[in-house]
């Protein structure tokens, strides 16, 4: 599919910020950023997942589609994505994890990007948490999801290599559906406020301190005492990726 807009300047000249799209960003205290450049209605669920993974310690960025229809018009491919606030977040970060959504109905995560060590670490943790994963290959069916172009926004960070996670439509639907069900069960609000509750619940369930305190280098991010994880929830996903990040930061991931 050819993008309607080839760059952000073209998009911003034809779409209204606050009406057609919004940008949310937060600087963290680590040198890692988690971004969702196709959030909101563009690739539904990716903003929420990226923010939950970022937590209060890693930097976070998302561009969300807000249109009632035709949000796909706001899609700018990763190699051409040049929105200034995103570029600044990426420039400040040594490592970037870019969260995307692909159209497959199967519940699966495709991992790509030039940082193969972090990709493999994340893959291992996700598998341990019960998620189906696939490292994209040059000659494979899903080679379009490899994210290995140096111009891909995930690879424009300080180290020149990042990670791209392509989460299938089927898995995103289940992760967010579970959170919506849990939100209703708890009597919490759904919609935007409900997403915030789900995010903070995922943080609590993964042992993340909402005050922003960063775990000591090498310290595993573990569940709060007595917390039992239902299989395949958003909290499971967040915990797996954050554990991989901590092992990566402490040098435990393979070179």
Image: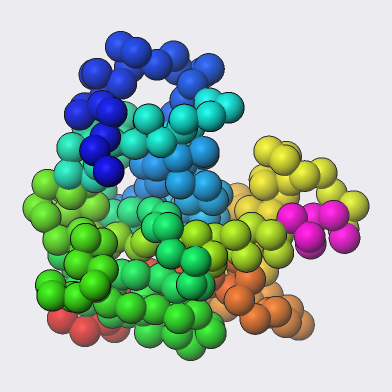
Q: What residue is drawn where x is 77% and y is 44%? A: 190
Q: Residue at 24% x, 18% y: name it.
A: 10
Residues 77 and 239: in front is: 77
Q: Is residue 16 above or below residue 129?
A: above
In which quadrant is the C terminus drawn? bottom left
In this picture the colour scheme is rainbow
Does 137 sit left or right of 51 as displayed?
Answer: left
Dividing the image into 4 quarters, which one contains the N terminus? top left
**Location of residue 116 in the rendering, given as x and y in whole percent from the top left corner:** 19, 73
Residue 111: x and y in percent read: 31, 70
Q: Is residue 184 magenta?
A: yes
In this view, the residue in front, 252 or 132, is 132
Q: Is residue 242 above or below residue 89?
A: below
Name the spot of residue 171 as percent of width and height, x first: 54, 67
Residue 55 at least partly seen = no
Q: Position of residue 142 (x, y in %)?
A: 26, 68
Q: Residue furthest bottom?
A: 128
Q: Residue furthest front?
A: 1
Which residue lies at the image location 49% right of the left edge and 66% below the top edge? 105
Prevailing secondary structure of the magenta residues: helix
Indicate yes or no whether the magenta region holds residue 233. Answer: no
Q: Quadrant of residue 161 in the image? A: bottom left
From which residue to which does the magenta span run?
180-185
User: On the rendered structure, is 151 left or right of 44?
Assistant: left
């Amino acid at each position: 599919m050819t993008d309607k807009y080839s760059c952000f300047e073209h998009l911003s000249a034809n779409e209204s910020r606050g009406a057609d799209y919004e940008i949310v960003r937060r600087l963290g205290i680590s040198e890692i950023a988690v971004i969702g450049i196709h959030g909101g209605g563009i690739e539904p669920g990716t903003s929420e997942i990226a923010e939950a993974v970022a937590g209060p310690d890693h930097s976070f960025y998302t561009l969300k589609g807000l249109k009632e229809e035709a949000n796909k018009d706001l899609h700018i491919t990763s190699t051409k994505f040049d929105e200034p606030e995103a570029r600044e977040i990426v420039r400040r970060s040594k490592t970037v994890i870019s969260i995307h959504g692909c159209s497959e109905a199967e519940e699966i995560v495709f991992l790509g990007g030039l940082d193969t060590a972090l990709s493999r670490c994340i893959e291992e943790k996700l598998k341990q948490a019960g998620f189906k994963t696939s490292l994209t290959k040059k000659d494979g069916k899903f080679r379009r999801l490899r994210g290995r172009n140096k111009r891909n926004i995930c690879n424009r960070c300080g180290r020149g290599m990042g990670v791209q996670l392509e989460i299938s439509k089927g898995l995103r639907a289940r992760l967010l559906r579970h959170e919506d069900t849990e939100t209703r069960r708890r009597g919490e609000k759904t919609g935007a406020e409900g997403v915030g509750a789900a995010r903070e619940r995922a943080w609590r369930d993964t042992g993340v301190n909402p005050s922003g305190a960063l775990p000591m280098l090498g310290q595993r991010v573990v569940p709060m005492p007595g917390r039992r994880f239902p299989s395949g929830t958003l909290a499971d996903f967040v915990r797996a990726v954050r554990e991989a990040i901590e092992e990566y930061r402490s040098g435990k991931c393979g070179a």
